[in-house]
Image (spheres, helix red, strand yellow):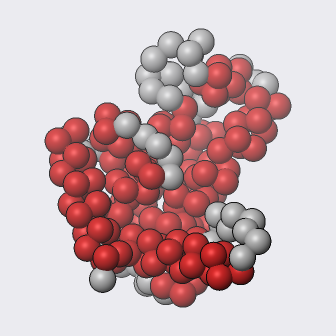
Amino acid sequence: MDAAVDPDAMLMLAYARGDLAAFEVLYGRHRGMLYRFLLRSVRDPHRTDELFQETWSRVISARERYQPQAKFSTWLLQIAHNLMIDSARRQRPVVDGEQAEIALAHASTPECEQPEHALSEFERRRGLQRAIEQLPEDQRIAILLRLEQDLSLEEIAAVTGAGRETVKSRLRYAMTRLREVLSE
């Protein structure tokens, strides 16, 4: 990938040359997205904090070796995903669904004049959050990368290290399961 196409890659290259302000811009642009991805994937605020810090530490450590072969956000998510896998291998995650639901309520409810409409929108989002939490880990991560990060199949494959067809299958199974759960 050409760094001129991805302004974030240009910032990372500037950071590698010693421009600390470039890192601050990158961090400001991507911290929310990265934190939400980690929290929704591991569903443990403590582990999320650890993985979030470790991901940024890896970015800092890799600054001199960075080569813009993919979008910066894809590279960042790949680092985070690899750290999640390593962390999961060391310990099985403890899932507290209620904490995840509270943290996942980051999307604002559209302003509506009718309170019952706002409540039904909240219930719909909460149902979707619960349904996503019930998915197997590989499907959950793939669907979060697709729905929240709007990544392509190729980008999801790069982040997760899975083949394109595997990602496609995971997304198809996840969407089928989500439709089943939400129609109940």
**Residue 69 sits above or below residue 123 on the image:** above
Of 6 and 174, the residue lying toward us = 174
Q: Is residue 133 visible?
A: no
Residue extending farthest front:
114
Residue extending farthest right:
21
Query: Could you tell me residue 16's position as x and y percent?
Result: 66, 24
**Residue 101 sits above or below residue 162 on the image:** below
Q: Is residue 111 visible?
A: yes
Of 124 and 10, the residue lying toward us = 124
Query: Could you tell me residue 53's position as x and y percent?
Result: 63, 57
Q: Is residue 80 left or right of residue 15?
A: left
Q: Which residue is drawn at 52% across and 72% down?
A: 125
Query: On the image, which quarter does residue 91 sit in?
Result: bottom left
**Residue 108 sits above or below residue 14 on the image:** below
Query: Could you tell me residue 63's position as x and y percent?
Result: 61, 31
Q: In the rendered image, which quarter contains the N terminus?
A: top left
Q: Is residue 173 left or right of residue 154?
A: left
Q: Residue at x 57, y 83 (%)?
A: 99
**Residue 87 sits above or below residue 114 on the image:** above
Of 121 and 45, the residue lying toward us = 121
Q: Which residue is drawn at 49% across and 86% down?
A: 96
Of 104 and 53, the residue lying toward us = 104
Q: Which residue is drawn at 54% across and 37% down?
A: 73
How many discs appear?
0
Query: On the image, which quarter does residue 3 sit in?
Result: top right
Q: In the rendered image, which quarter contains the C terminus?
A: bottom left
Query: Could you tell me residue 180's position as x and y percent?
Result: 25, 73
